Amino acid sequence: MTMRQNRLHAAMEEKQQIQEFRFGEKTNRRRTRTMSVAASDQEEEIEEGKGKEQVVDLDHGDPTVYEQFWQKMGDRSTIVISGWQSMSYLSDVGNICWFLEPEFTKQVRRLHQSVGNAVTEDRHIVVGTGSTQLFQAALYALSPPDAFEPISVVSAIPYYSSYPSITDYLKSGLYKWAGDAYTLKGDEPYIELVTSPNNPDGSIRQAVVNRDGGTVIHDLAYYWPQYTPITCLADHDLMLFTISKCTGHAGIRIGWALVKDKEVARKMTKFIELNTIGVSKDSQLRAAKILQVVSHSCEQLGYPEDSESFFKYASRLMADRWDRLRDAVSQSGLFSLPEFMPESCNYAGEMTTPHPAFAWLKCEGGIEDCENFLRGYNILTRTGKHFGAQGNYVRVSMLDREETFDMFIERLSNIRL
Ligand SMILES: Cc1ncc(COP(=O)(O)O)c(C=O)c1O
């Protein structure tokens, strides 16, 4: 192989690996095939110098949108960890969550205080390898340990597409996926997942079952000012947050839970102990640094006057993307989007409009399979069916890099029947 072929081969392999991370096995197989075809197309394109249309992949929610902000931050967000550091399994032996790094705790509390989006006083913090691990820890902690039947886990349609597979992939005897919260029958105990703002449609949500014997996990991954007005200090029993969607650092794999009940926090910690014997200290320290820079930029300490706070920057960016998307949708005339009303944001101190991390795009004009329709234009999205909804809806990530988003907007605005 020549060096160029080697590089191409490595790039194709990397693409393939990334695809294998994607959620939903059925989607995975098809996407992997689509992308390997796309990759070999690209190879041809490079070999023959042809200008072919590139695949625009907005299926997943990889939050690379904020990369430029972090490039601008330069060394302010850098940490150095020497070989002798972070060696022990233990971090804070006096804490229920004994693998929680004190600096990370400090920065989590500080950020919530600066933004005003969640209560942290008298809450136990449990750190996880992403909120994905914490979600499973919460299911473990909230399920009765010796029930005759696994407890039902529900969420209102359209729900985050990973909930069903994460709940059922181990065929647990403790809990099982039971689908749409609106259709939950009987009076058995249940666990309800409330995602607010919701993935995929950006709506603000509350629990819908509200029965005795139920517990609720609030997934607040998107309750940050760039996505929605911060209208209240969230004060639920179990709240999940993740650095992935807050600052865009999905690769650090850090999430945190704010937990009211000590026993629930203890059981969640136990799950993580059994699952991974704690959470990477290096990742927690890096996450702490990133959160510190964000809080610092919000509080405008030590920054040049012309530099923007992270949330101001991110809000501007999301608003711009949504404006462009709405223009493209109206130019095409074939699609529709949810409408959002402005509300008073306690953080911004003014009325702001929601700009969700995903667009819940509906194909109008009798197109029943919107995912397939858009694939015909080399635009990859995720069908509404993965969210328990109809195939005439797709979820489109608004969090990709600028060049991908530009291509998407251009292509979408030119689609006509
Ligand atoms: C609602 C919701 N919760 C959790 C996650 C996963 O977050 P993490 O990267 O922290 O595992 C996502 C990712 O897309 C999400 O949309």
Image (cartoon, rainbow, N blue to C red):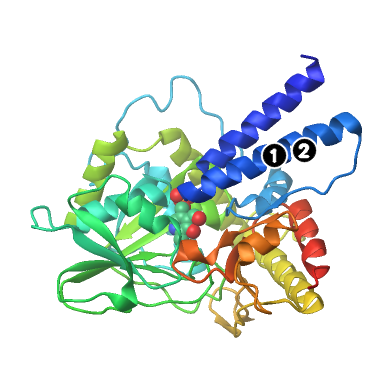
The residue labelled by disc 1 is 37
Residue 178 appears at what percent x and percent y? Answer: 28, 65
The circle on residue 41 is 2
Tag 1: amino acid? Val
Extreme residue toward the top, this view: 1
Distance Cα–Cα, label 2 vs label 1: 6 Å
Residue 262 vertical placement versus 100 (above, below): below
Quadrant that contains the N terminus: top right
Left or right: 30, with 161 as reference point? right
Q: Which numbered disc covers residue 376? A: none
Percent from the top left, x then y, of residue 190? 21, 67
Q: Disc 2 vs disc 1: Cβ atoms closer than 8 Å?
A: yes
What quarter of the picture does the C terminus occupy? bottom right
Residue 309 visible in the picture: no
Task: Tell me which residue sits at (60%, 82%) in the image.
Answer: 340
Q: Quadrant of residue 208?
A: bottom left
- Decide: few, some or many residues near mark 2? Use Cα within 10 Å; few <14, some 14-19, many ≥20: some
SS of the residue under disc 2: helix
Q: Nearer the viewer, residue 413 or 27?
A: 27
Of 249 and 347, nearer the camera is 249
